[in-house]
Image: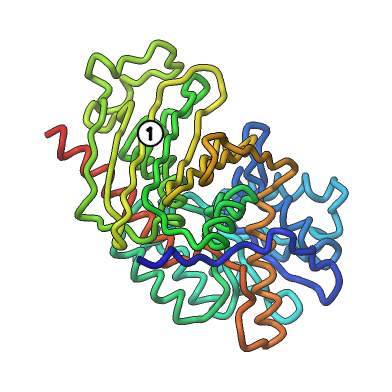
């Protein structure tokens, strides 16, 4: 059985800060694009690092134009004000298209709108199709998960995107981390065949006070909304999943082990049938014969999550701990029972995914025939497979309860 083949990230890519003006639109004026104090998401920060003085943000699209104007005013008072001096705010993509012409026409669009507006064939979930209609040759960076709607519709959206040939990436940033790429490098160097993946993700829920997150009708549940990154990493190492092989069990909110002592939300506001599970345990087979498993839990207090992914191959154990905050890689290899430890500091995988996407945009702008190796690691069509996989786990756990 041949080892899993991968494209690897050009993590050390240099910022493309010299050259012609680079025009960009942000869709969504929330935390994904402009950041918060609570988390690392902030695409505008990474874009500013990547393109530097070349950056010209021509538009911010958000139905809440007051929010867009607020974020724009903050940028104009900061050290990157020059990049936003020509920025206009728009309620829709169609409105942006009416005004952005000539030197203001965008080269790229970053989509940070909530997933309920994405991945569908009909309004209000047809954001990508609206972009393809009004800006058909423009590169896109789209946040994960690709949608909260039917995966069949997202699959069709992916096909339409692929036909354009535009550089389109989806934000599964952990694929770009130095630790993950070190694991991929070792697998390729040693010509290893992955035998098993084992993922564990346990949330610290005490500070989770957004009631929407506890409602499956809004967030689709913790596997689809939160564990999606670890489902995607599992696929990155193991390959495509046989969806009909997925089995799962859950600890539900109304079972004795599912009682939580430090909830700071009123869960009675959520209909009983839509309340999230406390733990989900899943297993499956990949199409190449490899096996995989995932445990996701809502159980810890304070703020730090527990996250770990282990990959087994003949003679090797690769264990990645805390990839979000303090990535540490433990490697056991043949002829030694001891694990060697590697730490990865000052690694911004959010920047790496934006940087790699930018490299591909520049390549196409220069009319080069062959794609750069190690660029976009998560295409839209591949991200749809991760979305289908997360739903397969959720539905399997719900069947087992019934």
Q: Residue at x 57, y 50 (%)?
A: 180
Q: Residue 370 at x, y = what percent?
A: 61, 85
- Residue 218 in view, yes or no: no
Q: Residue furthest left?
A: 402
In the rendered view, does 305 fall on the left or right side of 275? right
Query: Is 224 rendered above or below residue 376?
Result: above
- Quarter of the figure with the N terminus: bottom left
Residue closest to the eye, 267 or 204: 204
In the rendered view, does 366 fall on the left or right side of 210? right
Q: Residue at x 22, y 31 (%)?
A: 273
Classify residue 218 by image quadrant. top left
Q: Residue at x 56, y 25 (%)?
A: 304
Classify residue 188 by image quadrant. bottom right
Query: Is 173 rendered above or below residue 164?
Result: above
Residue closest to the eye, 221 or 394: 394
Residue closest to the eye, 347 or 64: 347
Q: Secondary structure at mark 1?
A: strand
* Mark 1 surroundings within 10 Å by alpha-carbon count, few (fewer than 14), some (14 through 19), many (20 or more): many
Q: Residue 30 at x, y = what percent?
A: 60, 45
- Quarter of the figure with the C terminus: top left
Q: Residue 258 at x, y = what percent?
A: 29, 19
- Residue 45 in view, yes or no: yes
Query: Is 21 rendered above or below residue 186?
Result: below
Question: Which residue is identified by label 1?
Answer: 296
């Amino acid at each position: 059985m041949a080892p899993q083949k991968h494209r690897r990230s050009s993590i050390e890519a240099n910022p493309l800060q010299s050259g012609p003006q680079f025009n960009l639109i942000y869709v969504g004026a929330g935390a994904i694009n402009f950041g918060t104090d609570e988390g690392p998401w902030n695409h505008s920060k990474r874009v500013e690092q990547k393109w530097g003085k070349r950056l010209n943000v021509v538009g911010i699209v958000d139905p809440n134009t007051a929010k867009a104007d607020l974020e724009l005013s903050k940028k104009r008072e900061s050290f990157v004000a020059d990049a936003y001096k020509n920025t206009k705010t728009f309620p829709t993509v169609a409105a942006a298209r009416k005004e952005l012409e000539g030197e203001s026409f965008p080269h790229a669009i970053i989509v940070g709108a909530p997933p309920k507006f994405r991945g569908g064939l009909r309004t209000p979930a047809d954001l990508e199709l609206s972009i393809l209609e009004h800006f058909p040759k423009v590169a896109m960076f789209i946040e994960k998960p690709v949608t909260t709607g039917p995966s069949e519709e997202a699959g069709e959206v992916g096909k339409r995107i692929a036909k354009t040939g535009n550089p389109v990436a989806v934000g599964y940033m952990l694929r770009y981390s130095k630790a993950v790429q070190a694991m991929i490098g070792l697998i390729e160097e040693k010509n290893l065949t992955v035998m098993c993946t084992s993922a564990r993700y346990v949330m610290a829920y005490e500070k989770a006070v957004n009631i929407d997150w506890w409602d499956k009708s809004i967030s689709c549940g913790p596997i689809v909304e939160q564990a999606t990154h670890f489902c995607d990493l599992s696929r990155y190492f193991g390959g495509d999943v046989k969806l009909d092989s997925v089995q799962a069990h859950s600890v539900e909110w109304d079972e004795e082990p599912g009682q939580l002592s430090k909830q700071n939300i009123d869960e009675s506001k959520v209909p009983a049938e839509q309340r999230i599970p406390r733990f989900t345990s899943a297993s499956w087979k990949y199409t190449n014969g490899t096996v995989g498993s995932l445990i996701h839990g809502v159980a810890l207090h304070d703020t730090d999550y527990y996250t770990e992914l282990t990959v087994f191959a003949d003679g090797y154990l690769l264990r990645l701990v805390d990839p979000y905050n303090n990535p540490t890689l433990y490697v056991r290899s043949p002829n030694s029972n001891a694990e060697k430890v590697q730490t990865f500091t000052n690694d911004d995988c959010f920047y790496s995914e934006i940087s790699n996407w930018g490299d591909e945009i520049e390549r196409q702008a220069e009319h080069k025939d062959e794609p750069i190796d190690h660029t976009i690691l998560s295409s839209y069509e591949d991200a749809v497979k991760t979305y289908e996989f997360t739903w397969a786990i959720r539905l399997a756990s719900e069947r087992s309860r019934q």
